[in-house]
């Protein structure tokens, strides 16, 4: 046995310190080390204490680079062998004193008996301090090769319905590879995903707040995570409407459990405007709105959805969404060809309702030139295999792998090996220059797939998340193997992230938030619904239009605004949530109301903002820039800014661009001023065009009176035009217009 001894400490001192009496005197019954264990374990006893105390957190000694003040630890203790070296052997062994454990620098600083920038992290009387002390006193043994590993965590209760103002104590048990188990409640790390509903103390005591809804507590111990879910009901269950499909059944079941009432169905006008904007990003025309509102067809809502899905505007609108996510970005004039080709491929795929798995496969496995195979344009923008894996993981699997490039993902089970195993799928992407500037030929470079990890001298073979394929033949493109794995019905990620992404599109909030961060420690607000939507999507053979159809036909989607008892609900879909129109949709809507158009370079006259192929038009449009159109630099939808700003308000109130649209000689105001039909008809038409509803009696009276003030004499036409401009200006600045509701 080899001991780590501080320099200059006589061996007789070490011997005395290691006598059975000396070490047994430290075996406190409340110790964090089980009394039955023969000796303290660095991995299973010391590392959990350091993690619980926050020593190996990012802001402390796991800080990138040299850690803190020259003392470095791995993030959250994911590399215990390295941590042992840093603690015991670095700095000439001065951090550990086997001969005099109480004088060990690691204990002196942690207990703040000498100056420590992190303050007091351990109480000398605590079991955690005693565990460290015992490990040092027993010789500071290194990690053993046959050390039992934690294989699972059991969190109790795993889920519970808890009353407001109540307290719940969690219990956490670690199960080990040798069949043993241990109560690690004191050593686990806890974090609430919604402190407004539940707060959690370091010892696992949960305090329930006064806000109705769902919340979860993440429990972390030695690289494993568990979750305790809590439902905080408002009171007694409320009666629910009859469900229209499985979405309603699962939403209403959740609302019943929480005692939250469901809002009634919205009226036809609200539904018409809502679904037209959500499916096509386009306001219905006044004529279409009048026709829909007058119809007595009981199936008119279903027929409306089908018509919207078959329209070219559907493909334009969703292509606008996907081109941003797939980084169709123009940085140079030579990008024009690939930008237009890639956008056209995405739009045509949506128009033809190409199955989503085929769409993903064609993108990931793209080969050739941008002319023969437009999806290779993605490889033009995303050249590094590491960036390729990160984008594919986040976009198509809902897994954010960026952290795992350097260390084990802190809130997930993915490690560096998983990161580089996924990168290996892109290790055989070859490139050859073509005659077109900045355009490459993309091909499968035959050979053994692998990617060298910084921690390994040999290439890491392709490994999907939680799954292995063995050796892939040199003649097989590993990207296609990855695409097949993603689209398999048993894949736990592919379908879930897509249905969650679309759910957020239609409701303004995902079942999981953020919509592309699906992990065990970020549970959905309705797990059963997310699973059912994913199963339905797979059963439909990844039919995107069928998914849209299913969502929009539900009573949940067609719900009205909040009512008494559910106004404060922001996560359970008891009522409609108002959503700001995106930059492109708002610009097009203003053009629709004003009967104007916006000109974009290199595009035909009349091209709408939702049909723009890339980000370059943001630079020439102050409107799109002010209202947050993304630059296509990220696969995260968070790049699109939906936050209101003073600049936006000022733009809508007095920007020359807005004034020009409203006052155009060819616009609606000029036309209305020339026409001789009654003003009431024009007001009806304007309200239908902007808000998809008839004006109220009060609105009609006020508008008519305002127009009448222009008079009928010479110059009246110009005065009436200005007043129609004013009416449109008022409408486009209302929340009813700027929001989809």
Image (tube, grey):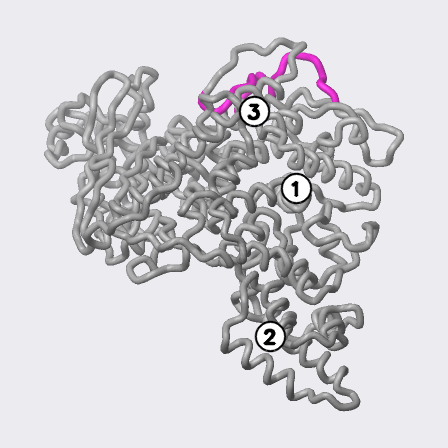
Q: Farthest residue to the right: give it.
A: 435
The segment highlighted magenta reads 443-466
Judged left or right of residue 285, residue 334 is right
Residue corresponding to mark 3: 453
Q: CA distance from mark 1 to mark 3?
A: 41 Å
Label 1, on which residue? 315
Relative to residue 664, is residue 38 depicted above or below? above
Specify which label sits upstream in the sequence, 1 or 2. 1
Find the distance from the CA under tag 1 to the CA under tag 2: 31 Å
Instruction: Answer whether residue 452 is magenta in the image.
Output: yes
Task: Evaluate whether residue 484 shows in this view.
Answer: yes
Locate residue 324, reporting x and y percent: 64, 44
Q: Is residue 91 visible?
A: no
Residue 730, label in figure: 2
Res 456 quadrant in image: top right
Is mark 3 in CB contact (under 8 Å) with mark 2? Answer: no
Asked if labels 3 and 1 touch by Cβ distance under 8 angstroms, the answer is no
Front in this rendered view, residue 117 or 543 = 543
Q: Is residue 704 left or right of residue 65?
A: right
Q: For numbered disc 3, what is the local secondary structure?
A: loop
């Amino acid at each position: 046995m080899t001991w780590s001894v501080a320099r200059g400490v006589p061996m007789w001192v070490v011997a005395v310190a290691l006598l059975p009496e000396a070490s047994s005197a430290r075996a406190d019954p409340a110790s964090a080390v089980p009394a039955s264990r023969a000796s303290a374990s660095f991995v299973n006893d010391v590392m959990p204490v350091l993690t619980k105390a926050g020593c190996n957190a990012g802001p402390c000694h796991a800080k990138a680079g040299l850690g803190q003040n020259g003392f470095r630890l791995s993030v959250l203790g994911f590399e215990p062998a390295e941590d042992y070296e840093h603690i015991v052997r670095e700095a000439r062994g001065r951090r550990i004193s086997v001969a005099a454990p109480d004088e060990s620098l690691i204990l002196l600083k942690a207990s703040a008996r000498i100056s420590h920038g992190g303050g007091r992290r351990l109480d000398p009387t605590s079991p955690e301090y005693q565990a460290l002390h015992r490990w040092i006193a027993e010789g500071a043994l290194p990690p053993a090769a046959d050390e039992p590993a934690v294989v699972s965590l059991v969190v109790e209760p795993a889920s519970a319905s808890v009353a407001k103002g109540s307290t719940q104590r969690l219990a956490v048990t670690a199960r080990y590879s040798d069949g043993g188990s241990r109560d690690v409640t004191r050593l686990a790390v806890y974090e609430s995903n919604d402190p407004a509903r539940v707060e959690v103390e370091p010892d696992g005591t949960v305090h329930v707040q006064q806000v109705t809804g769902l919340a979860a507590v993440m429990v972390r111990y030695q690289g494993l995570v568990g979750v305790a879910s809590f439902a905080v009901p408002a009171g007694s269950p409320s009666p629910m409407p009859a469900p229209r499909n499985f979405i309603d059944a699962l939403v209403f079941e959740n609302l019943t459990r929480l005692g939250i009432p469901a809002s009634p169905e919205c009226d036809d006008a609200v539904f018409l405007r809502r679904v037209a904007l959500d499916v096509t990003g386009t306001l219905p025309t006044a004529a279409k709105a009048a026709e829909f509102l007058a119809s007595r067809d009981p199936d008119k809502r279903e027929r409306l959805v089908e018509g919207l899905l078959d329209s070219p505007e559907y493909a334009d609108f969703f292509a606008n969404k996907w081109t941003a996510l797939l980084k169709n970005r123009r940085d140079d004039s030579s990008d024009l060809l690939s930008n237009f080709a890639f956008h056209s491929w995405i739009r045509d795929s949506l128009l033809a309702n190409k199955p989503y798995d085929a769409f993903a496969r064609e993108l990931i496995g793209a080969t050739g030139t941008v002319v023969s195979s437009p999806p290779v344009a993605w490889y033009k923008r995303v050249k590094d295999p590491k960036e390729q894996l990160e984008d594919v993981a986040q976009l198509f699997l809902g897994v954010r792998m960026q952290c795992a490039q350097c260390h084990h993902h802190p809130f997930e089970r993915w490690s560096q090996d998983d990161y580089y195993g996924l990168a290996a799928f892109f290790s055989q992407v070859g490139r050859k220059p073509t005659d077109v500037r900045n355009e490459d030929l993309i091909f499968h470079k035959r050979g053994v797939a692998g990617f060298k990890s910084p921690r390994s001298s040999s290439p890491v073979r392709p490994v999907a998340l939680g799954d292995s394929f063995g050796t892939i033949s040199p003649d097989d493109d590993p990207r296609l193997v990855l695409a097949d794995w993603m689209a398999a019905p048993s894949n736990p990620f592919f379908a879930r992230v897509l249905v969650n992404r679309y759910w957020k599109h239609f409701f303004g909030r995902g079942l999981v938030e953020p919509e592309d961060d699906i992990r065990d420690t970020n549970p959905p607000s309705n797990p059963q619904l997310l699973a059912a939507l994913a199963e339905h999507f797979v059963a439909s053979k990844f039919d995107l239009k069928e998914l849209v159809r299913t969502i929009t036909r539900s009573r949940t989607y067609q719900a009205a605004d909040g009512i008494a008892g559910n106004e404060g609900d922001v996560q359970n879909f008891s009522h409609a949530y108002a959503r700001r129109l995106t930059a492109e949709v708002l610009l097009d809507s203003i053009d629709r109301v004003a009967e104007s158009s916006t000109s974009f370079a290199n595009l035909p006259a009349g091209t709408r903002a939702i049909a723009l192929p890339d980000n370059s038009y943001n630079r020439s449009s102050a409107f799109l820039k002010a209202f947050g159109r993304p630059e296509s630099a990220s696969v995260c939808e968070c790049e699109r800014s939906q936050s209101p700003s003073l600049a936006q308000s000022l733009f809508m109130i007095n920007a020359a661009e807005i004034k020009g649209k409203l006052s155009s000689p060819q616009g609606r105001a000029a036309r209305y001023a020339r026409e001789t039909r009654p003003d009431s008809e024009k007001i009806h038409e304007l309200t239908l065009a902007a808000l998809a509803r008839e004006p109220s009696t009060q609105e009609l009276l006020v508008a008519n009176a305002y127009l009448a003030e222009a008079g009928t004499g010479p110059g009246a036409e110009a005065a009436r035009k200005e007043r129609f401009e004013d009416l449109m200006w008022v409408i486009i600045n209302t929340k009813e217009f700027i929001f989809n509701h």
